[in-house]
Image (cartoon, rainbow, N blue to C red):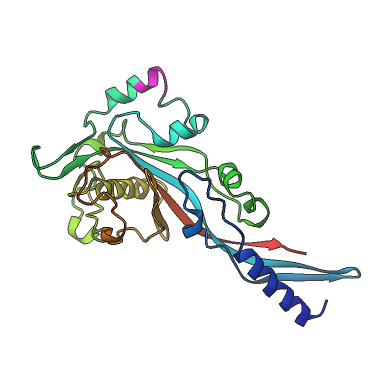
């Protein structure tokens, strides 16, 4: 295979796969907006008597974690969909333990509450298993960069510092703003915002920063509706569907997408 034919083949292959139909059955993941699969170059070419083997460099975004906020300790959006992944921390007798450990209690306090626009939500972070990604987007099994995690990474209920203001003492809140959502510090479960979905986004981001990390990632609302992928802190005017309306009491799920690159053999 000469280089000109090879380059033509790779170009056509890239065009065809950029047009791969995105499976829209996923309940949480906005694959159409966030996946952004593409070929970025050639990794290597190995030629032998019977032809050449080609590996191309593929780049896409992968939904490695989800972070949810809930109003009731022990409640879980992700757990209702994938009970085997969550484990037993939210089930049976453990749910009573979780509730007992959660001294802050979830809730939305508006102008009629003690502090105007004060929100407090419990937060959970889960790893998204590769198997879930492949089930929802089968072409990733052959053309995707394998990865992901599984299981519960963080639950705020047993974390006393999520329920008070003692974490991150001495950190300047105003210098840690997450766009216009609010301050990263202190990383606890209380936020002050007129929109419960924006408050949820901020608390989700705090929990991710505490555990899985947020560097280079994009975020997308996955429940109760979907948004496009965006940079954390992005102006809510373009995505806060609840603006001026009653919220869901803090029950939201957010998907965190990580950019990944790998080499895949195509011939």
What is the x, y in percent for residue 216? 42, 61
Taking the magenta stretch, the answer to whether it contains residue 18 is no
What is the x, y in percent for residue 138? 63, 49
Q: What type of secondary structure mainly makes up the magenta span?
A: helix
Residue 144 in view, yes or no: yes
Judge whether 19 appears above or below 41 on screen: above
Q: Which residues are magenta?
A: 91-95
**What is the residue that sits farthest to the right in this orientation?**
49
What is the x, y in percent for residue 147? 57, 50
| Residue 116 position by quadrant | top left
- Please state, as top left, top right, bottom left or bottom right, where the C terminus lies in the image: bottom right
Q: For the point 27% across and 58% down, which residue is it? A: 236
Given residues 50 and 20, the one toward you in this image is 20
- Please state, as top left, top right, bottom left or bottom right, where the N terminus lies in the image: bottom right
Left or right of 82 in this view: 211: left
**What is the residue that sits farthest to the top in this orientation?**
93
Left or right of 120 in this view: 254: right
Left or right of 228 in this view: 18: right
Q: For the point 55% across and 42% down, which residue is it? A: 129
Q: For the point 30% across and 29% down, which residue is it? A: 73
């Amino acid at each position: 295979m000469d280089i000109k034919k090879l380059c033509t083949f790779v170009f056509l292959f890239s065009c065809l796969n950029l047009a791969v139909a995105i499976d829209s059955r996923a309940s949480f993941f906005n694959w159409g907006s966030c996946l952004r699969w593409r070929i970025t170059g050639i990794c290597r070419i190995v030629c032998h008597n019977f032809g050449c083997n080609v590996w191309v460099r593929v780049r896409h975004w992968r939904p490695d974690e989800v972070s949810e906020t809930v109003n009731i300790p022990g409640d879980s959006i992700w757990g209702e969909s994938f009970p085997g992944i969550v484990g037993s921390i939210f089930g049976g007798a453990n749910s009573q333990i979780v509730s007992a450990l959660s001294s802050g209690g979830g809730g939305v306090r508006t102008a009629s509450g003690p502090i105007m626009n004060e929100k407090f939500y419990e937060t959970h972070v889960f790893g998204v298993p590769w198997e879930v990604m492949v089930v929802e987007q089968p072409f990733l099994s052959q053309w995707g960069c394998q990865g992901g995690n599984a299981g519960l990474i963080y639950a705020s209920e047993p974390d006393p510092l999520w329920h008070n203001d003692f974490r991150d003492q001495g950190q300047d809140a105003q210098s840690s703003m997450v766009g216009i959502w609010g301050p990263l510090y202190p990383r606890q479960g209380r936020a002050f915002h007129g929109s419960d979905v924006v408050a949820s986004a901020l608390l989700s981001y705090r929990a991710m920063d505490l555990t899985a990390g947020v560097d280079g990632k994009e975020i997308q609302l996955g429940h109760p509706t979907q948004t496009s992928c965006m940079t954390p802190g992005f102006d809510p005017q373009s995505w806060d569907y609840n603006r001026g309306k009653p919220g869901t009491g803090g029950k939201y799920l957010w998907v965190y997408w990580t950019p990944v690159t790998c080499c895949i053999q195509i011939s």
